[in-house]
Image (cartoon, coloured by chain):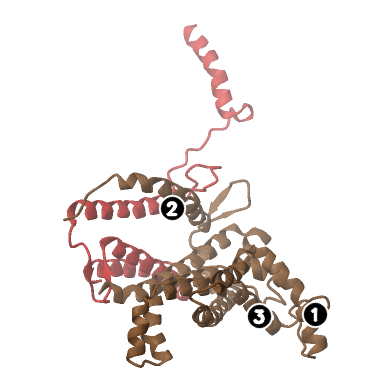
Chain colours: A red, B brown
């Protein structure tokens, strides 16, 4: 009897949660997707993929900031192969801007997929931090 | 020894917050839009980098980009030398200095859409003073609503009229800061006016000229209001610059995804050219 009463008490909440017309329809659980909206109906239209991209960029800026403040206090600037005097932040900026252009050029001239420019961008980033 | 004072960061904080709200948040939103498709109502569908590919390969974008570079190039090669020449010929002392400065500042005080409307009325063939003068007095066929060449001449002359003053005022500020001793030394050495300009005035104006060129590049590369009010991008698409095309795609066609991708490409170009220019101009100072 007790069990029956509990079931009757739970019924309206189940009905309310799923909508009156959908009591019999089971909602299908969707797995995580990098490309689905992160917070549906939010005007900034975040997706996990773009969120991760900005997390990486801001994370890189934060790491560079911490390194410049604590580790390389003096003599952080240097003259590289391009004849430019750059700090760590400058090198990050050059890497990111250069990578953006590598991807754009590949998209315009070759098209997708983008594994080729990804490799090139990584090589470019390593070159900039190492030599520029 | 360096003086350390971390409190300075607190003074910078309001600016950082302001920049976050008026620049970072919109840019992040544009990045999100550029990889998705929407039909309104905040409902989005993933599109990947298709919009970028489509925009980069479209003839329409390439033509607008070409027109934009041409416009900016013409603006810079006219306004920078003209601004320097006017600044050199302005008086350095006396009662005419404030008069010249006010006259120079006047065009910059006029709002951009008013400048466009003013030049529209001024150049219309039937009712405008310039249009009437060219067509009926000089007998030169001039109609910026029909002829692409006339439309180009008009938007360039309008921009020169509106913004050369900025170059003049910046160059003038650089010129008046040169101590008289330099000129006296040049006089003793018997230097010609060209040599005085080349070896004294130009190097001393370098910093302000860098700023002037950068500002004029960014402003002219992002120009929208004046040519839009004056020609509306016409006749045909002949004066449809990148920003006008962008607004047509974003607001006219409501294609927010392609418009977002296009604006990011636009932003990347502005960023690269400004960085390259600034780096090259300040490279010698860092030595």
Residue A106 visible within the image? no
x 36%, y 69%: residue:
A98
C-alpha distance separating marks 1 and 2? 52 Å
Check disc 3 and report its element: helix, strand or loop: helix
Please tell me whether residue B103 is drawn above or below residue B181 in the rendered image.
Answer: above
C-alpha distance separating marks 3 and 1? 15 Å
Whole-percent x, y for residue A60 in the image: 31, 55
Viewer-nearest residue: B228 or B237: B228
In which chain is the residue bearing label 2? Answer: A
> Does mark 2 fall on the same chain as mark 3?
no
The residue furthest front is: B94
Q: Which mark is on residue B125?
A: 1
Residue beneath disc 2: A50
Whole-percent x, y for residue B212 in the image: 47, 72
C-alpha distance separating marks 3 and 2? 40 Å
Viewer-nearest residue: B244 or B19: B19
Query: Could you tell me if the residues under marks 3 and 1 are in contact, i.e. CB atoms within 8 Å?
Result: no
- Closer to viewer: mark 3 or mark 1: 1
Specify few, some or many for label 1: CA neighbours under 10 Å numbering under 14, 14-19, or 20 or more.
many
In which chain is the residue bearing label 3? Answer: B
Whole-percent x, y for residue B32 in the image: 49, 53
Check disc 1 and report its element: helix, strand or loop: loop
Query: To which quarter of the image does residue B112 belong?
Result: bottom right
x 41%, y 76%: residue:
B205
Please tell me whether residue A109 is drawn above or below residue B244 in the rendered image.
Answer: below
Residue beneath disc 3: B152
Q: Earlier in the sequence, mark 3 or mark 1?
A: 1
Query: Could you tell me if the residues under marks 3 and 2 are in contact, i.e. CB atoms within 8 Å?
Result: no
């Amino acid at each position: 009897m007790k069990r029956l009463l509990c079931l009757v008490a739970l019924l309206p909440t189940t009905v309310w949660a799923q909508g009156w017309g959908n009591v019999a329809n089971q909602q299908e659980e969707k797995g995580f997707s990098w490309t689905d909206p992160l917070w549906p109906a939010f005007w900034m239209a975040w997706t996990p993929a773009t969120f991760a991209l900005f997390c990486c960029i801001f994370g890189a800026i934060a790491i560079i900031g911490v390194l410049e403040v604590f580790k390389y206090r003096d003599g952080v600037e240097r003259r590289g192969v391009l004849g430019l005097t750059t700090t760590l932040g400058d090198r990050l900026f050059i890497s990111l801007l250069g990578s953006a252009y590598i991807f754009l050029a590949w998209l315009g001239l070759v098209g997708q997929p983008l594994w080729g420019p990804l490799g090139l961008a990584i090589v470019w980033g390593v070159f900039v931090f190492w030599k520029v | 020894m360096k003086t350390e004072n971390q409190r300075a960061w607190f003074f910078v904080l309001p600016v950082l917050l302001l920049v976050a709200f008026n620049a970072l948040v919109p840019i992040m939103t544009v990045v999100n839009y550029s990889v998705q498709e929407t039909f309104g109502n905040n409902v989005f569908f993933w599109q990947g980098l298709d919009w970028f590919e489509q925009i980069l390969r479209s003839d329409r974008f390439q033509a607008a980009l070409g027109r934009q570079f041409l416009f900016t190039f013409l603006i810079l090669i006219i306004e920078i030398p003209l601004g320097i020449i006017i600044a050199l010929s302005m008086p350095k002392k006396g009662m005419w200095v404030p008069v010249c400065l006010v006259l120079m500042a006047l065009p910059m005080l006029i709002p951009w859409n008013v400048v466009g409307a003013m030049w529209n009325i001024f150049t219309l063939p039937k009712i405008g003073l310039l249009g009437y003068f060219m067509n009926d007095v000089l007998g030169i066929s001039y109609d910026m609503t029909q002829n692409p060449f006339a439309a180009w001449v008009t938007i360039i002359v309008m921009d020169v009229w509106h913004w050369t003053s900025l170059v003049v005022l910046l160059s003038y500020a650089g010129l008046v800061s040169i101590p008289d001793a330099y000129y006296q030394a040049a006089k003793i050495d018997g230097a010609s006016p060209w040599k005085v300009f080349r070896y004294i005035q130009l190097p001393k104006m370098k910093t302000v000229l860098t700023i002037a060129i950068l500002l004029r590049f960014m402003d002219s590369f992002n120009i929208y209001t004046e040519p839009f009010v004056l020609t509306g991008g016409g006749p045909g698409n002949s004066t449809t610059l990148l920003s006008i095309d962008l607004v047509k795609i974003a607001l006219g066609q409501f294609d927010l995804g392609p418009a977002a991708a296009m604006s990011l490409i636009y932003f990347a170009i502005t960023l690269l050219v400004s960085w390259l220019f600034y780096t090259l101009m300040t490279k010698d100072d860092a030595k």
